[in-house]
Image: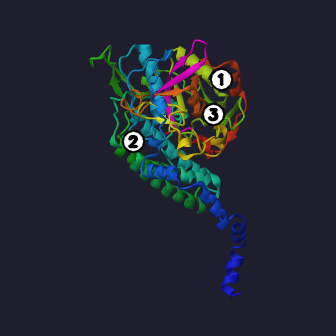
Amino acid sequence: MKRSLLLLLLAFPFSMSAQQKGEITNEMLKEIKSGYVGNATDKALLNAISSNDIRKLAVNRENLVGMDTHFSHRVKSRGITNQLQSGRCWLFTGFNVLRAKMMAKHNIYKMEFSQAYSFFWDQLEKSNLFLQGIIDTRERPLTDQMVEWLLKHPLSDGGTYTGVADLVAKYGLVPKEVMPESYNSDNTTRMASLLKEKLREDAMILRKSAESGASQKELQKQKTTMLATIYRMLVLTIGEPVMEFDWAPKDANGKTVGEVKHYTPQSFYAEWIGEDLNADYVMLMNDPSREYWKTYEIDYDRHVYDGHNWLYVNLPVEEIKKMAEASIKDSTMMYFSCDVAKSLDSARGLLDLKNYDYGSLFGTTFGMNKKERIQTFTSGSSHAMTLMAVDIAEDGTYKKWMVENSWGASHGHQGHLIMTEEWFDEFMFRLVVNKKYAPKKVLELLDEKPIRLPAWDPMFAEEE
C-alpha cells in the first residue's frame, strides 16, 4: 500500500466506516429512483411544477368559494398600521393594543404612537445589553455557547412583548406626529448590518482589554464610549429622540380637541395610558413540546439589561382561548403571535389548513403534529399581531378568529387576517392578556419558581 493512501486511511477512519454503512449504493439508487416513474402523469407534474410557483399549483380551489367575514364578538379597530420593511411587528402590535384602549377610553378619533421613538431606545438598550453581556462573559472562551450566542445575536429589530413593557416603563411614549418614521426605521436592514458589525468589533476590543487586565470600572468606561458612537449612529439614521413636546388630540377634521398641554414622554404615558404593562399582564404560551401548567423563563431574552426576562405560563390551547374570549368580550385587544407563513392566503387574508394541498401535488403526506413541528424546527412563532375578534357558534364552540395586522390596509382582508379554529390550534403560540381575564389557578403559577430555558432555545426567536 502506498504511504499516501495509508495516511489518508488513518486520517479518516470514521468517515470511511460511516460511508460503508450509510452510503447510497448502486442497488439503493435503483430503489430510490422508483420514486419517479416517468409516466405521463409524472411528466405532466414535472413540466408544471418545475416552471411555476409551487404554492400557486397547490391552491385548493374548493376552499376559494366564499370567505365568512362575520364575527360574533369584535373589538373596534380604527386604522391599520404598516411596519414596512422592518421586523418591528412586536412594537406595532404592542402599540396597537395600547392605542385601541386609549382611543376607546378617551373617545379619540385617531391615534398612533411613534414607533421610531421607542425603536431608537430599543436599539440603544439592546446594544448595551449585548456589550454588557460581553463584559459579563469576558472570562469565558469564544467557543463558550453563551459567548457564541451573543456574537451571533448582537442586535435585531425583532422583539417580544417584554420589550414593549420595559421600554414604555423606562422611556414613555410619544405621538407619531411628534417623532415620525425615518427611512431607516422603516427599512432597517442596512442600519442593522452596520450596527451589528460595530458592536462585534467593540466586543472584541472589550475582550482584549479584559485579557490585558482591565478592571470592571475601566471596561464600563469603554462601554460608555462605545455606546456614544452607537447613539450617534442611531440619531443619524432614525433622528434624535424627543424629550418634551406639546400635544392635544384631534377630531376627524384634524381640529384640536381640548387643551394643548406640555408633556415629557413619561408624563404623556402616565396621563393617557398609565398601566403597568409588566405587573398587570401575563404572557401565555401553547407549546406542546413542554409540560403544561408550568411557568418558564428565557435566559437573557430581554431588550433592556435592567429589564425583565421573558416569562410565560405554558397552557393547553383551550385554556388560552377562554381568556382570549373574555378579553374580546370586554372590548380589549391582545398581543398575539403565531407562525404566520403557514397556510397563508395573503390575497384574501385567510389562514386555513385547507388553503393549499401540497400532499396531493407531490403524492405524499406532510403529517407532523404541532409538537413534532416544534421539536424538528419546522414551526415556531414568527410574527406578532393584535387579536381583536372571535366568532362563537350558538353551541359555544369557536369557529374562527381575527387579528389586526401591521402590513398596511391593502394587505389581506382590509389589513386583517382571519384564522380558522383548526389553524389557530396548530400555529398559535403566544398571547398576552390582562391578569383580570386569567383564572386564579393560572396566576398562582406565577408565584412558582420558573423553569429556566437557554437564550438559544429554538422556540423563542424574536418576532419580526
What residue span does the magenta drawing correspond to?
A: 381-404
Residue 7 image label: none
Residue depicted at 53% across the width and 36% down the height: 160
Please tell me whether residue 71 is drawn above or below residue 287 in the rendered image.
above
Please tell me whether residue 298 is drawn above or below residue 351 in the rendered image.
below
Location of residue 319 (image quadrant): top right
- Name the residue tied to disc 3: 311
- Name the residue tied to disc 2: 85
The x and y percentages for residue 460 are 59, 41
- Crowding near the residue tagged with mark 2, few <14, some 14–19, many ≥20 C-alpha atoms within 10 Å: some
- Quick check: marks 3 and 1 in contact, CB under 8 Å? no
Magenta-span inclusion, residue 396: yes
Q: Earlier in the sequence, mark 3 or mark 1?
A: 3
SS at circle 3:
strand
- Name the residue tied to disc 1: 319
Q: Earlier in the sequence, mark 2 or mark 1?
A: 2
Q: Is residue 14 visible?
A: yes
The kind of residue on which mark 2 rests is Gln
Residue depicted at 56% across the width and 39% down the height: 302
